[in-house]
Image (tube, grey):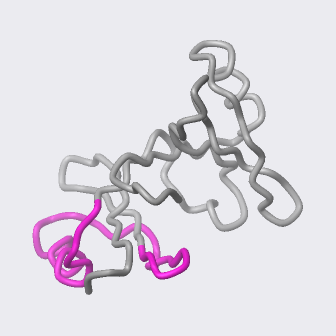
Amino acid sequence: MSDSAGDWRDLTVADAVETSTFYEKVLGWQKEPLDMGGYNDFVMKDADGQVKGGICHRRGPNQDVPAGWIPYFTTGEFDEALSQVTACGGEQLTAVRTHGTARFVYIKDPSGACFALYSDGSGS
């Protein structure tokens, strides 16, 4: 995760090593390994060191994360927003997860597009 989760995105794939190398070659990004307990996922940074997102293996804690780039949309009213997901025709794809005081959950909207609903922990 990042302090500016509104600018964060993850790509979860079968082979994060190969995929991260693709983005290194195509966009000039650099990868920083992130220990996942037995393997590494990657934080991707541009040439100026600005974090662009993460590229993750689709295993371990990420085995049920939808494939493809996932944006994280920040809400100050996490519980209320989550309660509206199914009420408005969406689908909660995973259990709520935590990262420090932050909470996030993967969602599918009624059109089938996936995203993560995110709260930094300062709201509900």
Instruction: Using the rendered view, name the quadrant where residue 37 is placed.
Output: bottom right
Quadrant where the image shows the C terminus: bottom left
Residue pictured at 24% horizontal, 76% vertical:
82
**Rendered view: 100 above or below 85:** below
**Residue pushed farthest left?**
88
Q: Is residue 61 left or right of residue 3?
A: right
Pick out the residue farthest to the right. 38
Residue 18 % position (x, y): 75, 28
- Quarter-wise, where is residue 19 in the image? top right
Q: Is residue 79 above or below residue 10?
A: below
Residue drawn at (38%, 72%) of the image: 120
The residue at 26%/82% (across/down) is: 123
Q: Is residue 63 left or right of residue 51?
A: right
Residue 14 lies in magenta, yes or no?
no
Residue 110: percent from left, percent from top? 18, 55
Q: In the image, residue 119 lies at what x, y percent?
A: 34, 72
Comparing 49 with 120, the one in front is 49
The answer to if 86 sits in the magenta stretch is yes
Vertical order, 4 against 82 (above or below): above
The residue at the point 71 percent across, 58 percent down is 59
* Residue interval drawn in magenta: 74-103
Residue 60 picture location, percent across and down: 72, 65
Residue sitting farthest toward the top: 26
- Place residue 93 in its image quadrant: bottom left
